[in-house]
Amino acid sequence: MKGLFLTLEGIDGAGKSSHLDALEALFRSQGRQVTRTREPGGTPLAETLRGLVLEQSMDPLTESLLVFAARRDHVVQVIEPALARRDVVLCDRFSDATFAYQGAGRGFDLQVLATLERWVQGLYGADSGALLQPDLTLWFDLAPEVAAERLAGARLPDRFESQPLEFFRRVAGGYAARAAAAPRFARIDAGQPREQVWQQVEAALAERGLVADPSGGAP
């Protein structure tokens, strides 16, 4: 049994984070050890950088560099050791979010982001030249208009959540482009009731043979 790297992606308000408890419980019921984490964040240093990215004004290059700096520490300190222990790593966002938010949303150079991705997620040793990428990415796809309704009045927005609707349309398009290019994506229709969304998550895991008996029910 090898480690499993599973990420949850989607625009703010898509509801992805609300399924983390159920995912953790499902894998633990299969006898797996689970490491649960998030980006930006996951380590003390990365959490500090997260605070800067979410609250301080900066240009897209600075923003991207901070996100990838946080990711590097996260990969080295948390993700790679957990995978070496054969854990299931459940990560709320990873590099797809950077291409969607900084790339498509901010309009930052995708080639520069790809270079940073190679530097930060490059594997060494026997896997030299490969990139650390999720085994499965659950993409919670939701119309930006619906996401905005869900977020309205929920809490004080950070500098991403407070962006105009057109920004989130671009972000959603960035996720769609990443999904079209990578078979590891499983699209989840996040506009459905929560129980039906969870059923889609279970089905995506079952189709890839990642759970033995995906009958855990709704979260």
Image: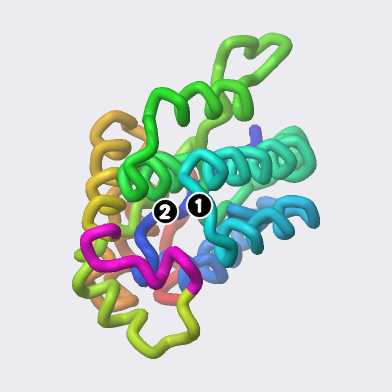
Where is residue 86 drawn, in percent x and y? 71, 38
> For residue 3: magenta?
no
Q: Please report the residue visible at 65 percent of the width from the left and 20 percent of the height from the top.
A: 123
Measure how far apart labels 1 and 2 are at the Cα level: 5 Å
Render colour scheme: rainbow
Residue 184, position as x, y percentages in the image: 38, 35
Residue type (three-letter) at the residue carrying disc 1: Arg
> Judging from the image, what secondary structure is the residue with disc 1 in?
loop
- Where's residue 190, x and y in %? 28, 66
The label on residue 9 is: 2
Mark 1 neighbour class, 10 Å CA radius: few under 14, some 14 to 19, many 20 or more: many
Q: x and y percent of residue 26 in the render? A: 54, 62
Q: Is residue 15 above or below residue 152?
A: above
Q: Magenta segment, principal secondary structure?
A: loop
- Residue indicated by mark 1: 93
Any part of residue 4 in sight: no
- Which residues fall within the magenta stretch? 158-167
Contact, mark 1 vs mark 2 (Cβ under 8 Å): yes
